[in-house]
Structures are given as structure tokens and as C-alpha cells.
Amino acid sequence: MASSGRRTGSADLPLHGGKAPHWLFRRMVALTRELVRIMVAEGGPEELLRRLSDPRWFQALGCAAGFDWHSSGLTTTLCGALKEGLRGLEGEVGLQVCGGKGAAARRTPEEIRAVAERCALEGGSLVEASRLSAKVDSNALQDGYRIYHHSFFVTARGRWAVVQQGMHEGGWARRYHWLGEEVSDFVRDPQAAVCGRPGPALNLVAGEGEANREGSVALCREPPARLVGELARAREFILPGRHRILAEDLDPRRLERILLKTYERPPADYASLVGMAGVGAKTLRALSLLADLLYGAPPSFRDPARFSFAHGGKDGHPFPVDRTTYDQSIEFLRRAVSRARLDRTERLQALRRLHTYYDVEA
């Protein structure tokens, strides 16, 4: 134990395939349903969103619900249990979960619109928040992880949070947390937290990359033929080391069609560019490269991953833990579990999991 009072250590979180056993998932649904009831009663649905956007608290909730602390499946299974557990309780708790894994993620927009209609909310802005958060983590943050899980939590007042997860071809996973009330700009350090193994990344939404984003938008007003020509020449140069990510897999001729689209309808800002249909990672990468070469505005390669212990892959990097925050989360969950309307045996098992997970000195 460190003398400063902060707990330190490391955790390996291997990927686990397959599905959660039915007997476990059924109990997770029952437990999370009662936990959410208690949590909303104590702090309201907006406070629950804030806690879900905290990767440490999210991980603790998954453990309290009975899932393996060291498995990538905690993210998808916990979100699925929350969605199923809240089904039919939307009016009572003022919260609904949209989306999920794979095909369920693609149904997110229609599920959000249904919530908006029932709660008299502006559905278009909520759908756009869901879409932009997914596009930012898929295309504007180019860290090698393919997003395959997207859960959108929305309250009856229109407040929202996002938990999504991506998979790396090397066998690691990464989790992205968003909290709507903290997002003032979708393309400037928008995530509440990113959990994953640090590595090479092209971060087009880093705070320090504003000049590169402005240059990318300005280039959308240039004739496509000029941009294609510049890209063709750039591929023949011996570029500085910082272009090791940008220059690969860029085919100027294939980009010409989408560049023509951006030229005919120039985006007003970078968020509009990211959200434009057809604009993907390669287009953003090409524009970023050109903004650097033509305007001297380099992009950022800062990986925003901050919590290596709470992602779904194998990391092995040490992580500091704020013991006060942990203790507050534990106490909150313990109160919720002890008050939950559950069978006594299941309640005791949930509390025992909390003790086991947190009371071990690192």
C-alpha cells in the first residue's frame, strides 16, 4: 500500500468469447433492476448517468452484478442487463437504454426516436448525439479499434450518456464513455473517459489539434483536383515520422468522389465534416495530412486512453486508483444492494463480491 493513501497495481483483462450463461444473465437483470431503482431514488436518473460515465464505477457495478471483473464481456453484458432490467420501468426510473451490441447498435436511432416521442423530447438532437459519438470514436479517433457496441442512455429530461466498446485486431478491446452534460464540443476532447491499452493513435479531436481541424474544413472548399494532386505528390515524399499513420492506405483517386461531395457542400465546421455521410476515417486522415503539409497545422497523436484497468483487453500497465472515490462508490453500491428487493442469498452474494473485489490490498 502506498504511503500516500492511493492504491496502485495492475490488472490483466483478457478477452473472453461466447455469451454470458443464461442463469447468470437472468440474475444480473434482476439485480441491476433493483440497483437502478435504489440509485435513482437516491440521486435521480441524471446522477446515474454521471456514474455510468465513470469507468471505475461502471466496472464496480458490473462486478456487483456478478460478472467477471477481468473479462471484456462485462461491458456488453452489463449494458444488456441494464436494458433488459429497465424494460417496462421507464416511467418509474425516468431512464431508458437504447442500442447495444452488433445489430442492436444499428437500431439505436429508432429506439431513441421512440423515447423522444414518448417523453416529448427533441429526437433529432439525441439521434445526432448518438451518431456523432459513434463517428468520432470510429473515424476521428483513429486508434485501431473497431466499434462494435454502442449503448445510449437517455433520461426523460433528455440528458444522455454513451458507453461503447471497440475491438482491436490484436485481441484487445477499448471502452469509450461519454456524458452529455459535459460535451460542449463533439470534436474537442469530448469523451468523459477512454479505457484501453495505450498505443499509436491519430487523435483528430484532441484539444491541441484545433488548427488542423480548421485546416481540414478549409480544404473542403478547394477544388478536388488540387487536393488529389497534392495527395499524390505527398505519397512520393519522404514524410516526417509523424506521418507514419496518415500516409498509409491513402489512394487519391478513390478519395476524389467524396472530396467532390465536400467541395459541392462545404461543411460549416469540423463536427459537420465528421458527421457528413460518406466521410470516413480515410477522408479525415487525408484532409489532416493536407492541412499539415499545406497550412503547417499538425494533428495530434495523443492517445486519450486514461484508464487501462477498466477496458476489455490485456494491458499490464499500472493504474493509480483514487481510494476516496473508490470507497464512495463501494459504499453507494453496498447501500443499494442491501436495500434491493432481492432474495437474501443473492443479496449476500452480491455484497460478498464487492468485499472480495475491493478489500484486497494491491
Image (cartoon, helix red, strand yellow):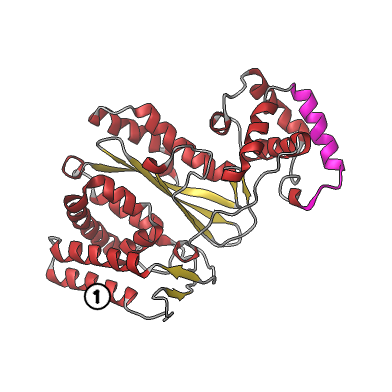
Q: Main secondary structure of the magenta part?
A: helix
At 34% from the left edge and 34% from the top edge, which residue is drawn? 112
Q: Nearer the viewer, residue 38 or 19?
A: 38
Residue 117 in the image: above or below residue 301: above
- Name the kind of residue labelled 1 in the image: Arg
At 71% from the left edge and 49% from the top edge, which residue is drawn? 245
Q: Quadrant of the N terminus?
A: bottom left
Q: Position of residue 305 (x, y in %)?
A: 53, 57
At 61% from the left edge and 43% from the top edge, which residue is drawn? 204
Mark 1 neighbour class, 10 Å CA radius: few under 14, some 14 to 19, many 20 or more: few
Residue 58 in the image: above or below residue 315: above
Residue placed under numbered mark 1 in the picture: 352
Q: Position of residue 103 (x, y in %)?
A: 43, 43
Q: Is residue 238 magenta?
A: yes
Q: Is residue 210 magenta?
A: no
Q: Position of residue 126 (x, y in %)?
A: 38, 33
Residue 101 in the image: above or below residue 3: above
Quarter residue 91 falls in? top left
Callout 1: helix, strand or loop? helix
Residue 304 in the image: above or below residue 128: below
Q: Tell me the magenta residue range.
A: 223-241
Q: Quadrant of the C terminus?
A: bottom left
